[in-house]
Amino acid sequence: MHDALQTLGLKVSEADQPKLTRIDLLDQQALPDHEVWVDATAPETMISAIRALKVRGAPLIGVAAALCLGHYARSHVPEAIQLVALALRQARPTAVNLMWAIDRLMQLPAEAMWPEALAILQEDINLCQRMGTAGADLLANGDGVLTHCNTGGLATAGIGTALGVIRTAWEQGKELHVYVDETRPLLQGGRLTTWELEHLNIPYTLITDNMAAMLMQQGKVQKVITGADRIARNGDSANKIGTYSVAVNAHYHQIPFYIAAPYSTLDATCASGSEIPIETRAAEEVQGVVQAQQSLRWAPATAPVYNPAFDVTPASLISAWITDQGVFTSAEALYGSGPV
Ligand code: MRU
């Protein structure tokens, strides 16, 4: 067995013999109270882990799916690889990083897929680092920074997108205070961003999503930074449900609203946000809380529910996109930036 390759949310134990290689995920549904690692080497386990948000966050979904496919390709025939690639692609619809990673592998011969998957993992670490450096300059000493969902080491292979920017600025010595939207209905902010910030020792306050406007009114928020799951050619950016309201509130209060995302989140095939497929999820997630360890329902089980997992923030509400290629204030410049 070779040394394990480990990120905050993912572990690859590599061996010369493909059969002995394992891909483990930190089960994000069990956090923050339980740190449980699950073996997701088999495609069916990986697909259900992606659907159940045991592994989540646009870049990390892409990395995890690439590793699973790349490993599978080491010992299966092309027809079987095609089927697994399709099933992985369909596991979640909105984060384009998933399709980007699968497509990148499927252009290659089977034997090249595993090394490419490992290269995607390494590349994501580097992309996060660059976003962090590019975005940190936008944050000033003393800023209150509001963020939505989880965009850190649990959502990527590296330091994160929006949270990576915050972390980099903090490590540069800037005094910041992070306001963490809990992010209904699945509480990625309340469960995961809090957990990461605790570990990083960065000061934060957890708020419910409907408190953000009041905090802005009180002058506590100087910047907003979120991630994205897919950015259309005109700059419209899909991210966790609730991001759009945060952007509207930031606009009203004249607070800069930034999106941090790597080039793997750009989708030139979508002309605008209206073409971005939006995942809808189970009614139970809104009727109550469904977690790995417990579930509690407060609405009638028959309550009709609409549960879109993402919304689209129009480009006009976005002050700038922070990418691995720098900071861009227009969609034209963003799309002109090209890949690394
Ligand atoms: O449903 P999730 O938890 O996968 O949604 C994640 C987000 O919306 C993140 O903000 C996004 O993936 C960008 S994070 C690096």
Image (cartoon, rainbow, N blue to C red):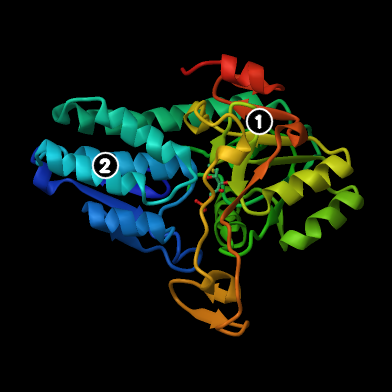
Instruction: Give percent across and percent down for residue 189.
Output: 61, 57
Question: Residue at point 59% right, 76% down?
Answer: 287
How many numbered marks have been drawn onto this rendered protein structure?
2
Say what secondary structure mark 1 lies in: loop
**Side (left or right) of 336 relative to 47:** right
Q: Nearer the viewer, residue 146 or 205?
A: 146
Q: Quadrant of residue 258?
A: top right
Q: Mark 1 = which residue?
A: 172
Q: Amino acid at mark 1?
A: Gln
Q: Is residue 44 visible?
A: yes
Quarter of the image with the N terminus is: top left
Instruction: Give percent across and percent down for residue 105.
Output: 27, 30
Question: Residue at point 75% right, 51% down?
Answer: 245
Say what secondary structure mark 2 lies in: helix
Q: Nearer the viewer, residue 178 or 119?
A: 119
Q: Nearer the viewer, residue 119 or 275?
A: 275
Residue count near mark 1 (Cα–Cα under 10 Å), binned few <14, some 14–19, many ≥20:
few
Q: Give the mark nearer the N terminus: 1 vs 2.
A: 2
Question: Residue at point 28% right, 40% down?
Answer: 67
The CB of the residue at mark 2 lies under 8 Å from ligand 1: no
* Numbered circle sitting on residue 85: 2
